[in-house]
Image (tube, rainbow, N blue to C red):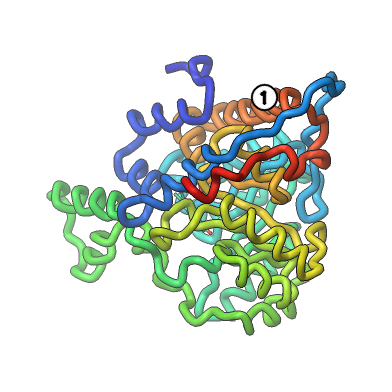
């Protein structure tokens, strides 16, 4: 279908499912095990309702905000997802160009298909980019990546902490298996075969340091001036520890339901984390909390901001938009979210991101879904 026939982000997913290369679709869409957490990421948002206000002058709506001190036109960002070229020949640079034109922040993944410099070079010189780091057991490699990112103008370091081992994404593994057993021309080394049978995800992740721990935060602090955030925090206790260890923030995330099956949704944890941080006297404008997972509507984003998130990341939906319609698709996805956010803010009776607060949401149903 033409891009005009796309009305919401889920439409991109439907088109992607039917038109993408099956292996790419399997890698992007899969969650771990029975995908309970992946579905819960969506479901949790559906248990939160609004408490709208009326008779507010809503003729002008401003959804711009700042994240880590950088201006952005919207309260959401494009989060880090590996292997962009599975979905589009130009890979992550497609996201970069769309993000630049729409004033959206992009997080560059360690495991991008494009070279890091290509992705930075695709930026327009004014747009904000962040860097997601998978911590390599070889710290010299890490240091080089981080120093290079900083030197190239990256404005935030997001250390992924939820993946000491990659989750079992069986759809991905099965698709690799299928490819393997149907391709008669392949004459690969036995070892390589095993890697492939484990799926795209596992094949690329063997370098990740399983010994990463709290003491490493100080080391990262010693090698960079970029804000340091931990991506993949999933509990109140770890949120508090991150603040104690001098991190600049966290991303509450379960990796899009691709890691620990039965990990809770970020939005649910957010409702516990924000009060706990405030009770500890943490300034949540300085120690910033982000969330990702399961977001596909402007209303989801508003709910997270109401509950204290500084910004909201989207992974898969931008991949689907990129894979189906390229840069125009990603821009359209951004525009749809903008339209939805604007309309929802107007109907909610708020005109700026700063006005969004807990009093606009009803979370009573969240815990007993
Ligand atoms: C991811 N995610 C991820 N996270 C990370 O820190 N490093 C990575 O390399 C990747 N790679 C990756 C690939 C794919 C295909 C997906 C779907 C996800 C997790 C990602 O940053 C984010 O946490 C989730 O994607 C958010 O959930 P949604 O928006 O996909 O539901």
What residue did someone put label 1 on? 339
Residue 138 relative to residue 201: left or right:
right
Examine the rendering and report whether any part of residue 105 can be seen: no
> Residue 363 in the image: x percent, y percent?
61, 44
| Closer to us: 185 or 153 | 153
Q: Quadrant of the N terminus?
A: top left
Examine the rendering and report whether any part of residue 62 can be seen: yes
Crowd around label 1: few <14 · some 14–19 · many ≥20 (10 Å): some
The residue sitting at 45% across, 45% down in the picture is 85
Residue 310 relative to residue 201: left or right:
right
Residue 93 relative to residue 73: left or right:
left
| Closer to us: 146 or 299 | 299
| Closer to us: 139 or 297 | 297
Q: Is residue 189 above or below residue 11?
A: below
Residue 190 relative to residue 80: left or right:
left
The residue sitting at 61% across, 26% down in the picture is 336
The residue sitting at 75% across, 41% down in the picture is 359
Q: Is label 1's Cβ within 8 Å of ligand 1? A: no
> Residue 5 in the image: x percent, y percent?
49, 15
| Closer to us: 9 or 299 | 299
> Residue 366 in the image: x percent, y percent?
55, 46
Q: Is residue 279 above or below residue 271?
A: below
Res. 276 image quadrant: bottom right
The furthest residue to the right: 57
> Residue 267 in the image: x percent, y percent?
58, 50
Res. 270 image quadrant: bottom right
Q: Secondary structure at mark 1?
A: helix
Q: Is residue 87 above or below residue 59?
A: below
């Amino acid at each position: 279908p033409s891009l005009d026939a796309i009305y919401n982000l889920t439409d991109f997913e439907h088109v992607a499912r039917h038109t993408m290369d099956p292996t790419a679709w399997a890698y992007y869409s899969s969650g771990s095990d029975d995908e309970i957490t992946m579905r819960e990421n969506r479901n949790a948002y559906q248990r939160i309702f609004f408490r709208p206000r009326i008779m507010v002058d809503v003729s002008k709506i401003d959804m711009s905000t700042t994240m880590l001190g950088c201006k952005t036109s919207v309260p959401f960002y494009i989060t880090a997802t590996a292997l962009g070229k599975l979905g589009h020949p130009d890979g992550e640079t497609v996201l970069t160009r769309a993000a630049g034109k729409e004033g959206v922040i992009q997080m560059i993944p360690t495991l991008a298909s494009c070279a890091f410099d290509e992705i930075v070079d695709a930026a327009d010189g004014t747009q904000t980019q962040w860097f997601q780091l998978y911590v390599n057991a070889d710290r010299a490699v890490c240091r080089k990546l981080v120093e290079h990112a900083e030197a190239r103008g990256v404005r935030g370091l997001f250390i992924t902490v939820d993946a000491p081992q990659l989750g079992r994404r069986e759809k991905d593994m099965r698709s690799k298996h299928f490819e393997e057993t149907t391709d008669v021309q392949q004459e690969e080394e036995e070892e390589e075969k095993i890697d492939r049978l484990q799926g795209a995800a596992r094949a690329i992740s063997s370098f990740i340091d399983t010994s990463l721990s709290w003491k490493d935060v100080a080391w990262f602090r010693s090698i960079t001036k970029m804000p340091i955030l931990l991506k993949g925090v999933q509990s109140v206790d770890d949120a508090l520890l991150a603040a104690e260890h001098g991190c600049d923030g966290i991303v509450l995330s379960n990796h899009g339901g691709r890691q620990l099956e039965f990990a809770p949704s970020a939005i649910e944890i957010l409702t516990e984390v924000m009060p706990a941080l405030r009770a500890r006297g943490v300034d949540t404008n300085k120690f910033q909390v982000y969330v990702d997972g399961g977001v596909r509507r402007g209303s989801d984003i508003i709910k997270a901001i109401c509950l204290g998130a500084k910004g909201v990341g989207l992974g898969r939906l931008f991949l689907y938009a990129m894979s189906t319609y390229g840069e125009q698709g990603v821009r359209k996805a951004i525009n749809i979210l903008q339209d939805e956010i604007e309309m929802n803010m107007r109907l909610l009776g708020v005109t700026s991101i700063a006005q969004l607060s807990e009093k606009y949401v009803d979370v009573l149903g969240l815990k007993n879904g």
